[in-house]
Image (cartoon, rainbow, N blue to C red):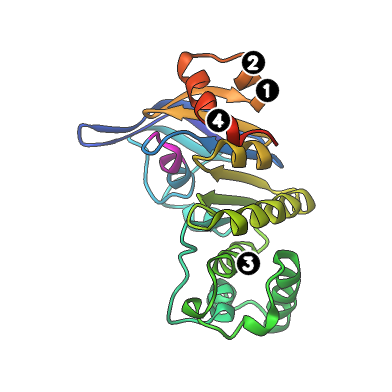
Amino acid sequence: MIQLKNVSKNYGSVVALCPTDLNIEEGKVTALIGPSGCGKSTILRLINGLISPTRGIVEFEGQIISPQNILEIRRRTGYVIQDGGLFPHLTANQNVLLMPKELKKPQTETQQRLEELCQLTDFPPNLLNNFPGELSGGQRQRVSLMRALILNPDVLLLDEPLGALDPIVRSSLQQELKDIFQSLGKTVILVTHDLHEAAYLGDVLVLLKSGQIMQQGTLDQLQNQPADTFVTKFITSQRSLIEI
């Protein structure tokens, strides 16, 4: 569904992503993992058109992503970042319905969709009139997820969506996300540094280091057929976390 073809990204002399080829399969959850600064979020931003490649092309269903079509493609993607990215001066309801209102979607249609998403994400409807500062971290992430799903996108881009949450809330939301991914069957690209999370949620794991893909495959393949000593080192460092 999404392809990176010989894509690289430089900021002056700093290389954020080396020349990279990557295929994202439709209907699968692809987890981008690796240490901080390895290029995970760069790939997500390239797909979402927030940055442009220094070289190479990014394709969405065979279309090269460009300034001419990026708005159309963004409407087919939902984007969730670590802190939720909610507007603090808007209520939960207003945050979720921001894009439908901008696109002048019928109010009855969006209200029905909002009710469905509250049920899907287990968000209490009585909190929809609360501002982000009046919600817990887990509730804010649910609102952010609802906002990403409100237009029923084909693709979900999740950049460390649970990274700022405490372990108990994070574990609960991991279970909920897995159920949501399975029920919706959407194409999902998840950025995380947590191997347990990647293995639990992802169909395909893509391990990066210093802007390069070191190995791609299942957790079993990374464990038992490591392509590089770094792969083994990365897995060993999180061994206590991957007994899932």
Q: Is residue 6 visible?
A: no
Determine whether the residue tagged by mark 1 lies in a helix, strand or loop. helix
Displayed quadrant of residue 9: top left
Q: Earlier in the sequence, mark 4 or mark 3?
A: 3
- Labels 3 & 2 near each other (Cβ < 8 A): no
Percent of width and height locating residue 164: 48, 56
Badge 2 local density, few (<14 within 10 Å), some, or many (20+)? Answer: few
Distance from the alpha carbon under mark 2 to that under mark 4: 15 Å
Q: What residue does disc 3 label?
A: 146
Disc 1 to disc 2: CB gap under 8 Å: yes
For the residue marked with disc 4, what is the amino acid?
A: Val
Image disc number at residue 224: 2
* Structural distance between the alpha carbons of marks 1 and 2: 6 Å
Residue 215 on image: x %, y %: 54, 22
Q: Quadrant of the N terminus?
A: top right
Indicate yes or no whether the magenta region holds residue 222: no
Disc 1 residue type? Asp
Work out whether mark 4 precedes mark 1 in sequence or the reverse, and give the earlier one: 4
- Tag 4's secondary structure? strand
User: Residue 220: which disc?
Assistant: 1
According to the picture, the residue beneath numbered tag 4 turns out to be 206
Distance between mark 3 and mark 1 Cα atoms: 32 Å
Q: Earlier in the sequence, mark 2 or mark 4?
A: 4
Real-space CA distance between mark 4 and mark 1, rounded to the nearest whole angstrom: 13 Å
Camera-side mark, 4 or 1: 1
Q: Amino acid at mark 3?
A: Met
Query: What's drawn in magenta, residue-wise?
Result: 38-43
